Image (tube, helix red, strand yellow):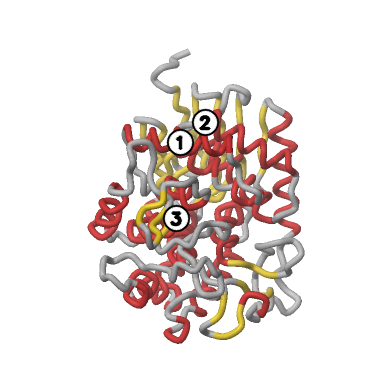
């Protein structure tokens, strides 16, 4: 079982709580699909947005069968009659959740979810190396439909970006995950998720065109949250802003850093009302090297001890993949590690870490050194830490002392 130890007892206590709480949400067996609870604790269901964001933590906890079954179930639900939208929620036995579905023209649907499912499913291929994520007919068809037929069916002006009706009615379809937002035709999180899905599929030229469009949404301080019938809307958009760096649409460089500065200011002054919205923040803050801010918001999630399943699953992800800075590439027997330990955490050790068919132990001492032990696996694992790359065979350890610290 995945284990975490640290010189900071707070980290160990937080991990035990998050791991045990997340595993308690598993609903596999007794007539159910391999599945876990992903949505409000009052609703015994799994929702597409929640599954997408819980999947990395679920993998770390060994719930690969559950991830695969739920993603495939959503993939199968995207039909021509539903204009290629996947359904929003299912009961654990696979039945459609009537609460969110009335008929094929009146059900909850949000554009980011269409692409998020593709992006996160392919991310599971990175974590597991399991060819089913690529070869399964239902998933493979979904990846094509989400980025081709879905776009064509919802792209009235032919610019390659699907539009919502602009009613802000979730049963008629919205452009954003932010259900409290203004009636947008296009939203930053929808565009970002589409960009991320295309990049995961290797369709970089198409993704670059979307990024070029997004660059035109800049006002000198930050990007617009989306487009209304009146044009670009630069108001604070929560998910339509904060999910943009999650999928990489805002890129890197000076403008991207200024945008992150804007996000951090807004996150402080106008935080969301829903706890699950906070759960994305450490992901992009760690990814962009804003480690102290990422840790601050990780602790906010931990200290909430909120029973929303997304919180425990994402806390597992942030404490492991976030703090260690893991970028798995299991299909190519490779892993990149970048320490994101904040000043408060002197060391962190994660054991029984699953990367593809490999099981690892990783220990970080601040940002000074990283030690990777491969317990088992089908062969050597290529591990990159900073500028150093090592081939680590099963039963062996590589220790990297970072260039700025040769002690």
Crowd class of label 2 (few under 14; some 14 to 19; many from 20; radius 10 Å): many
Which residue was labeled with disc 3? Answer: 189
Q: Nearer the viewer, residue 159 or 329?
A: 159
Measured in 3D between alpha carbons, the distance from the residue under mark 3 to the one under mark 2, in whole angstroms, is 23 Å
Whichever of callouts 3 and 1 sits on the residue coming sooner in the sequence is 3
Measured in 3D between alpha carbons, the distance from the residue under mark 3 to the one under mark 1, in whole angstroms, is 16 Å
| The quadrant where residue 100 appears | bottom right
Whichever of callouts 3 and 2 sits on the residue coming sooner in the sequence is 3
* Residue 286 vertical position relative to residue 28 in the rendered view, above or below: above
Picture residue at 70% right of the left edge, 40% below the top:
302
Q: How many marks on residues?
A: 3
Tag on residue 291? 2
Picture residue at 69% right of the left edge, 27% below the top:
8
Q: Nearer the viewer, residue 123 or 1?
A: 123
* Residue 140 vertical position relative to residue 397 in the rendered view, above or below: below
* Residue 259 vertical position relative to residue 151 in the rendered view, above or below: above
Which residue was labeled with disc 1? Answer: 262
Side (left or right) of 224 relative to 179: left
Q: Nearer the viewer, residue 201 or 215?
A: 215
Q: Name the residue furthest top.
A: 407
């Amino acid at each position: 079982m995945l284990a975490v130890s640290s010189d900071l007892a707070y980290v160990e206590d937080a991990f035990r709580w998050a791991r045990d709480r997340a595993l308690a949400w598993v609903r596999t067996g007794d007539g159910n699909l391999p599945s876990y609870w992903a949505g409000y604790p009052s609703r015994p269901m799994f929702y597409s947005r929640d599954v997408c964001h819980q999947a990395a933590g679920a993998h770390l906890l060994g719930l690969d069968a559950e991830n695969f079954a739920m993603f495939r179930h959503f993939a199968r639900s995207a039909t021509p009659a539903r204009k290629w939208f996947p359904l929003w929620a299912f009961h654990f036995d696979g039945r459609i959740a009537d609460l969110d579905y009335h008929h094929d023209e009146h059900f909850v649907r949000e554009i980011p979810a269409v692409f998020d499912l593709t992006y996160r499913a392919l991310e599971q291929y990175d974590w597991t190396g399991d060819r089913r994520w690529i070869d399964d007919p239902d998933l493979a068809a979904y990846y094509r439909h989400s980025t081709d037929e879905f776009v064509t069916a919802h792209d009235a002006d032919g610019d390659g970006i699907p539009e919502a009706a602009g009613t802000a009615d979730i049963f008629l379809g919205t452009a954003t995950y932010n259900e409290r937002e203004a009636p947008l035709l296009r939203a930053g999180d929808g565009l970002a998720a589409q960009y991320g899905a295309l990049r995961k599929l290797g369709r970089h030229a198409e993704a670059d065109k979307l990024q070029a469009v997004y660059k035109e949404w800049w006002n000198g301080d930050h990007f617009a949250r989306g487009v209304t019938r009146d044009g670009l809307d630069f108001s604070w958009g929560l998910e339509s802003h904060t999910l943009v760096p999650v999928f990489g649409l805002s890129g890197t460089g000076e403008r991207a850093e200024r945008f992150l500065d804007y996000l951090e200011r807004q996150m402080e002054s106008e935080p969301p009302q829903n706890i699950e919205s906070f759960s994305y923040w450490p992901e992009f803050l760690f990814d962009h090297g804003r480690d102290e801010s990422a840790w601050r918001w990780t602790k906010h999630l931990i200290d909430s001890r909120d029973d929303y399943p997304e919180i425990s699953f994402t806390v597992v992800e942030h404490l492991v993949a976030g703090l260690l800075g893991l970028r798995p590439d299991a299909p190519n027997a490779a892993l990149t590690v970048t320490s994101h330990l904040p000043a408060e955490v002197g060391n962190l050790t994660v054991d029984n870490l699953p990367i593809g068919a490999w099981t690892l132990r990783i220990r970080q001492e601040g940002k000074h050194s990283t030690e990777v032990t491969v317990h088992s696996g089908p062969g050597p694992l290529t591990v990159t830490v900073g500028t150093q790359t090592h081939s680590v065979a099963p039963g062996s350890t590589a220790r990297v002392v970072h260039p700025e610290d040769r002690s």
